Amino acid sequence: MPLRRPGRAPSAPAPRASAPARARSRRRLFLVAPFAVLMGITGGTLALTTGSSDASDLPSRGVPESVAVKPVRTAGESVVQIVAHPDDDLFFMNPDTSQSLATGRALTSVYLTAGESDGRNARRQDPRPPADKAAYAEARQNGIRAAYAEMATGNRTSPWDRTSITTAGGGRAELDTLRARPQISLVWLQLREAGSITGDRPHSLHGLWDGRVERLESQLAAGSPVGEDFSYSKTQVIETITGVLRRFEPTFVRMMDPTPGINERTGELSDHQDHMYGARFAQAALARYADEPGRPHFAVQNYLGYSTGSLPHSLDPASVEAKLRALRTYAWTDHTDYCEDPAGCGDRKVAARPAGHGWAHSVRYTRSDSTSWVQRGARPGELYAFAVLDGRLAVWHKAGKRAWTGPVMRPGGGMDGGVTSVRLPDGRIAVLGTRTELDEDAPEAYRREVVTAVQTAPGGGFGPWRSLGTPERDDATGTSDISAPAALVDRAGLMTVYVRDAGHGLAVTSQRPDGTWTAWAPAGGTGLRGNPVAATDAAGRGHVFAATARTVLAWTQAAPGGPVTGPVRTGLPPTTVALSAVPDGTDGVRLWFRKPDSGAVRTARFTDGSGVASPVRELPGGLAGYGAVGAAGDRLALRTATGAVATGPAGALRAGGGRTLFGGAPAATPYGFATLGLDGGLRWDEWGRSER
């Protein structure tokens, strides 16, 4: 099995006594906040009820039971975001976060660490204040509450109710609920952060994951209703996150990339170590949660962290400004207005640079931008759709004009979000993706590999997953940072599979006539980003494309059945990295991509196997958005700047109405298009119906 784990540790961690002075300060906060609310004193972000969700705790806290407000879960869709620090969601997941808030459905953000940093809440140019980690953690919490309240209600001072809850790991966490929108919750686990992006900090999520420390201590925010410090073992952190998932029953999980790769220039980790190892703890918890019966299906989407800032901007100016508005609120840019908390009401470090290092200008998914997850079957009008739910392959089927059936859940867990598919010459379908193997007792065994499953017969079931291995030597070398796979199929039905490796080059493996596969080998290219894409033209020539920060490179066949050679410089301008490729006419392949700083859709055509692009054509109308573009002939399906889907002929795209959000990218077919909803369900629209 992809996940191996030990028996569960005892649930009660050994508490650490807090300092008397801090305990006295915390008790004062417990008593004042509830009565301020009861008396109708609502001082903006300080209108925070401090209570407990456990009735047994209420008398000792002096908090009326009626004050404790429990979160509300809306029917159907429930999104849970798991991040390491306050602001990771604002920098790397927005505008997806704000779009979810606008739907009125359930959203919960989980913060693993307190984000206490050096405890100095000031811009670099400000006078250096004394270090106070508890106060800085509280200020960042205040900033997040203000930003979420503003995104959800338009009023940053909309009050929250703050509660202490028991965790499945045996400690306590803070649960905040937005009073005006109780389906919106924040969970603060308040573990100690690393305090360094890449430096050696054993007392961190990294050190705990690797087994260099047995326990990780808490860092409580100054105003938190959690009254006693605690510490967690590795198993207890995983149990705690699993318990949060159990409580909120997500249908869609957003988290950072657990394999962010290595910075090519410095040779160091390309993302914050808390982002990476926080995501690995979340992976382990999701694997446990997937084994529990009775929960709804859930999908997972990973987000690129720090390195997104070095790539061409993926968002349009209006989206960037909306994202910056939330970040400025979080950063408490006006500094004194509305704030009565001596800890401060936002993150002043971010106030100096609210866009971060270009992070506010982009949002990028890792391994889930495929537009080839819907495939034609062997019979006319037959379709199959594939997605990853609960870490397993989910298969839907449509026979002609009949309704879709499914999902049928295939055996085998550990699958990463995002799969692609190809059709073999005999009508069978092959599905490809990546799978993560992890062992809680052996962190060095962490590994991501490419896998494929093939139909046993046209229209039949799918065989077991087959591992194609990985081009990576080990996890320590490149954090197992391989892309989603792309595949070409020759006329004999043999596949050639490509991935971007951790060295940012292209790697390839080929299927032999006896069904075995060659060892992974370099295929060239430098500075590759995102996921490669592949398509075969009507003449039988294969084309593979991969983006860099400056252009797109191509690998092509000069003649059907010949060797795939490259990379070739296509001559294309910079893109936002997300690509899609489809056959076009009798002799070509068409590549679809987005214009940086705009999101406008662009396209170029490739013929004759040279890898040189035709002149770039930009679609009229300037419809902004982000992510890969689904294409079938002259009809497109794509994500708009609001998160909705736009469809129609390339020259007359129309944005859909409503607030129906989806994960990944749309898939287009000759008959219609599909999206995977945030409720884990397949959504299908026929072209004629969607264009009326």
Image (cartoon, helix red, strand yellow):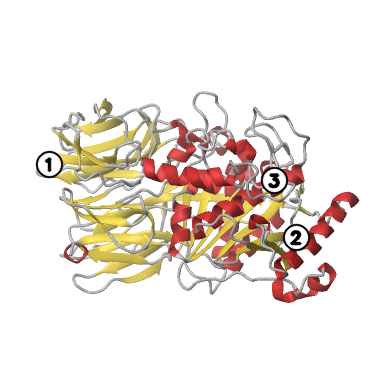
Q: Residues within 10 Å of mark 2 (few under 14, many from 20)?
A: many
| Side of 167 relative to 375 (left or right) | right
Q: Which residue sits furthest right?
A: 20
Name the image quarter holding the N terminus: bottom right
Residue 523 placement (x, y as % from top left):
34, 30
Location of residue 45 with respect to 200 vertically, above or below: below
Q: Earlier in the sequence, mark 3 or mark 1?
A: 3
Residue 167 placement (x, y as % from top left):
70, 63
Mark 1 element type:
loop
Label 3 vs label 1, nearer the camera: 3
Residue 277 placement (x, y as % from top left):
61, 44
Out of 386 and 171, give the one closest to the viewer. 171
Tag 1 residue: 539
Q: Earlier in the sequence, mark 2 or mark 3?
A: 2
Please name the residue shown 71% across and 76% down the image.
66
Q: CA distance from mark 1 to mark 2?
A: 67 Å
Tag 2 residue: 225
| Side of 463 relative to 652 (left or right) | right
Q: Amino acid at mark 3?
A: Gly
Mark 3 element type:
loop
Q: Amino acid at mark 2?
A: Pro
Whether residue 416 is visible to the viewer of this picture, yes or no, is: no
